[in-house]
Amino acid sequence: MPISDYYRKLREKVGTDLLLLPSVAAIIRNEESEILFQYPRNSDAWSLPAGAIEPGESPAEAVVREVWEETGLEVEPTNVIGVFGGLEFRHTYANGDQVEYQVTVYECKIVNGTLEAVDGESEILKYFIEDNIPKLVLPYPEWIFRKKE
């Protein structure tokens, strides 16, 4: 779901003004240790499976929901890799909506599912090796993509 009822109602009140959004993102590796990225529809860059936290939802619950909606995969969050935000995590969408994400990034393992965009938000879902990460919408530090031994 591109925008929830909660955030749609906020947008009706504030228009395109800046919203600070608590969010989550997932680093999901396949058997070859490649990382899953999505290319969202109407975008000019890739992203991790990610999205906003809904009212009453914990960050861990949000990452499980967002990954399912965007990839068709059921995951289990195993570790918080980091929390990122600030000016570098501001983004203006094509419709003019301004956001500043505060993102909790989780390492997640696949429990079940088949790779497919359930909500239609992802145009492409593809695994990349950590030395060949695509151009991303948000400037995550490179170290989060390095596999911990």
Image (cartoon, rainbow, N blue to C red):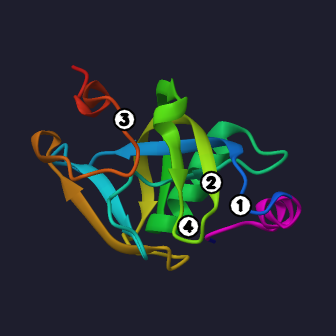
Q: Marks 2 and 1, how far apart in space?
A: 6 Å
The residue positioned 33% from the left and 58% from the top of the image is 46
Q: To which residue does mark 2 refer?
A: 98
Indicate which label's residue lies in the foreground, 3 or 4.
3
Which is more N-terminal, label 4 or label 2?
4
Instruction: Please report the bounds of the magenta region as a residue range.
Output: 2-13
Q: To which residue does mark 1 refer?
A: 16
Quick check: marks 1 and 3 in contact, CB under 8 Å? no
How many residues crowd around disc 1 within 10 Å: few (fewer than 14), some, or many (20 or more)? some
Amino acid at the residue labelled 2: Gln
The residue positioned 62% from the left and 49% from the top of the image is 99
Amino acid at the residue labelled 4: Glu
Q: Marks 1 and 3, how far apart in space?
A: 24 Å
Q: To which residue does mark 4 refer?
A: 69
Q: To which residue does mark 3 refer?
A: 140
- Magenta segment includes 23: no
Query: Mark 3: which secondary structure?
Result: loop
Which is more N-terminal, label 3 or label 2?
2
Indicate which label's residue lies in the foreground, 2 or 4.
2
Q: Residue 48: where, in percent of width, then height? A: 39, 51
Quick check: marks 2 and 4 in contact, CB under 8 Å? no
Quick check: marks 2 and 1 in contact, CB under 8 Å? yes
Which is more N-terminal, label 4 or label 3?
4
How many residues crowd around disc 4 within 10 Å: few (fewer than 14), some, or many (20 or more)? many
Indicate which label's residue lies in the foreground, 1 or 4.
1
Q: Marks 2 and 3, how far apart in space?
A: 19 Å
